[in-house]
């Protein structure tokens, strides 16, 4: 009887090993068959958006030159009629249509070297009372920088202004 049990034990363990090996092969074949037939759906890649960078603002190096006839004392006193007259001269200039000014050089007239202080005050008043007012109205001068100067040997009732406008910025 002992022999029979030994053979039975050997047979059970032997079959168990083969059964494990067959099961392992069947699982492997199932795994391989599953992978071979698998086609993954590609993950959508969002399109790359390259931002368009607008060109930097650049001033036109050729200024729009204005020669304005003014009432110098009226400008110094803040007379609304004198200011309106100068604004009308500027608005009627076709070279400023649909433009935006970046730099305005204003030259007040000084007949002699003794009058340079008055010429600078007139130029500053033209900047602050005329050009800035037009800019506040949305006309050409809304982002401009102003620099007052004097023009020796000219009448205080004449203003020369060089308006440097942007090449690639329009107000229309």
Image (cartoon, rainbow, N blue to C red):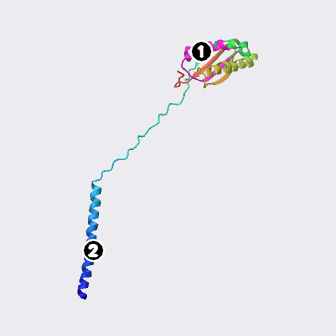
**Between discs 2 and 1, the one toward the N terminus:** 2
The residue lying toward the viewer, choosing from 89 and 63, is 89
Q: Residues within 10 Å of mark 1 (few under 14, many from 20)?
A: some
Residue 19 versus residue 91: which sits nearer the camera?
A: 19
Q: Residue at x 41, y 42 (%)?
A: 46
Q: Quadrant of the N terminus?
A: bottom left
The picture places residue 15, in percent across and down from the top left corner, at 25, 75
Residue 154 visible here: no
Is residue 86 inside the magenta stretch?
yes
Above or below 45: residue 72: above
Q: Which residue is mark 2?
A: 17
**Residue 73, x across and y down, in percent:** 73, 13
**Magenta region: which residues?**
83-107
Asked where in the image residue 141 lies, by quadrant, the reply is top right
Q: Is residue 91 magenta?
A: yes
Asked whether 166 or 63 is in front, the reply is 166
Classify mark 2: residues with Cα within 10 Å, few (<14), some (14-19) or many (20+).
few
Q: Is residue 64 visible?
A: yes
Q: Nearer the viewer, mark 2 or mark 1?
A: 2
Residue drawn 62% across the image and 12% down it = 89
Q: Which residue is mark 1?
A: 91
User: Quadrant of the rendered structure where residue 139 is?
Assistant: top right
CA gap between label 2 and label 1 equals 103 Å
Q: Residue at x 24, y 79 (%)?
A: 11
What numbered label is drawn on residue 154? none
Q: Position of residue 8 (x, y in %)?
A: 24, 81
Name the secondary structure under disc 1.
helix
Left or right, 76 with reference to 58: right
Q: Position of residue 36 (x, y in %)?
A: 27, 55
Res. 77 image quadrant: top right
């Amino acid at each position: 009887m002992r022999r029979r049990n030994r053979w039975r034990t050997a047979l059970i363990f032997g079959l168990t090993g083969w059964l494990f090996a067959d099961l392992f092969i069947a699982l492997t074949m199932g795994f391989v068959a599953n992978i071979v037939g698998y086609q993954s759906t590609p993950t959508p890649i969002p399109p790359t958006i390259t931002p368009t960078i607008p060109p930097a603002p650049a001033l036109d190096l050729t200024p729009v030159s204005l020669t304005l006839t003014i009432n110098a004392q009226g400008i110094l006193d803040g007379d609304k009629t004198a200011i309106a007259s100068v604004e009308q001269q500027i608005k009627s200039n076709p070279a400023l249509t649909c433009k935006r000014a970046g730099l305005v050089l204003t030259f007040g007239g000084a007949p002699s070297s003794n009058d340079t202080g008055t010429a600078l005050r007139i130029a500053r008043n033209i900047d602050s009372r005329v050009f800035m007012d037009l800019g506040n109205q949305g006309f050409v001068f809304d982002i401009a920088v102003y620099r007052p100067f004097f023009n020796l040997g000219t009448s205080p009732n004449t203003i020369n202004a060089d308006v440097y406008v942007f090449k690639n910025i329009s107000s229309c």
